[in-house]
Image (cartoon, grey):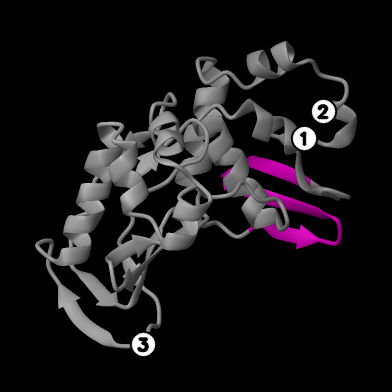
Amino acid sequence: MPQSRHPRLATSLPVAALAGLLFLGACSFSSRPVRTYREFTYAWSHHNGRRVHGLVSDARRKTSTPAYWRMVSREPGREAVALPAGVIRLQWSVTVPVVFSTQVWKYTRHGWRLVSSPFPQYGQETPDRAVVAFTRALEFQRFDVLAQLLPDELRLAISPEDLKKMFDRKRPEIAELLARLKKAEGTPVLVSGTTAVFPYDTNRRLRLIKQDHGWCIADPD
């Protein structure tokens, strides 16, 4: 699936199955769902909006057009990502983990179709999601998301230009911060009331505070 400096769509994490109506058993990479997935990513890579449109669910086709998928697939950074190696356990409903969201593929009378949004959300309703959103926003340079993750007083005081300079991945300190955050993924966030701390290195912490619109990154150590 595509990934982006906007949302990220897929990673090299294993593909897992949700509870469904029938268990179809283990399936190799020659399976029909995998071929469909590859067909989808091939169409995406070649900006074939008509084919992408044909591989999503009926409900999603009603709210989108081939032109929309063609346009979105051409956006910078939205590249097709291959499926990870391994065995996929199949049921009627299959999910693809995408770090902090999932894609749901469902078997219909037309074959396997994508029924969820292909784009994960940058959430901040919990400290854990805010940390992951911050990490991914840094990785894909989503400055709009980074701005949303800042406390109100800082977000309102900083200009878009200064925000880009502050979080530019080309800066050595930001590159190092991103590397350490990614390495620490899965480390528990320590929460105390409306504040939280994410220990992403031996002596480094990411401090978070809760505001009206969600958890914000107050201070990357």
Q: Residue 155 falls in which quadrant of the image?
A: top right
Residue 202 is a magenta residue:
yes
Left or right position of 117 against 46:
right
Separation (CA) of disc 1 from disc 2? 6 Å
Q: Residue at x 40, y 82 (%)?
A: 19
Residue type at mark 2: give it: Arg
Chief SS of the magenta region? strand
Separation (CA) of disc 3 from disc 1? 43 Å
Q: Earlier in the sequence, mark 3 or mark 2?
A: 3
Residue 141 is a magenta residue:
no
Q: Residue at x 76, y 53 (%)?
A: 196
Q: Nearer the viewer, residue 67 or 161?
A: 67
Q: Residue 70 falls in which quadrant of the image?
A: top left
Separation (CA) of disc 3 from disc 2? 47 Å
Q: Position of residue 65 (x, y in %)?
A: 45, 42
Which element carries disc 3, helix, strand or loop?
loop
Q: Is residue 209 visible?
A: yes
Magenta span of residues: 189-208
Q: Tag 3: Cα neighbours inside 10 Å, few (<14), some, or many (≥20)?
A: few
Which element carries disc 1, helix, strand or loop?
loop
Residue type at mark 1: give it: Leu
Q: Earlier in the sequence, mark 1 or mark 2?
A: 1
Q: Earlier in the sequence, mark 3 or mark 1?
A: 3
Reply above or below: 24 against 167. below
Q: Tag 1: Cα neighbours inside 10 Å, few (<14), some, or many (≥20)?
A: many
Which element carries disc 2, helix, strand or loop?
helix
Residue type at mark 3: give it: Leu
Q: Residue at x 62, y 22 (%)?
A: 167
Query: Which residue is disc 1 drawn over?
Result: 150
Query: Which residue is disc 3 drawn over?
Result: 21
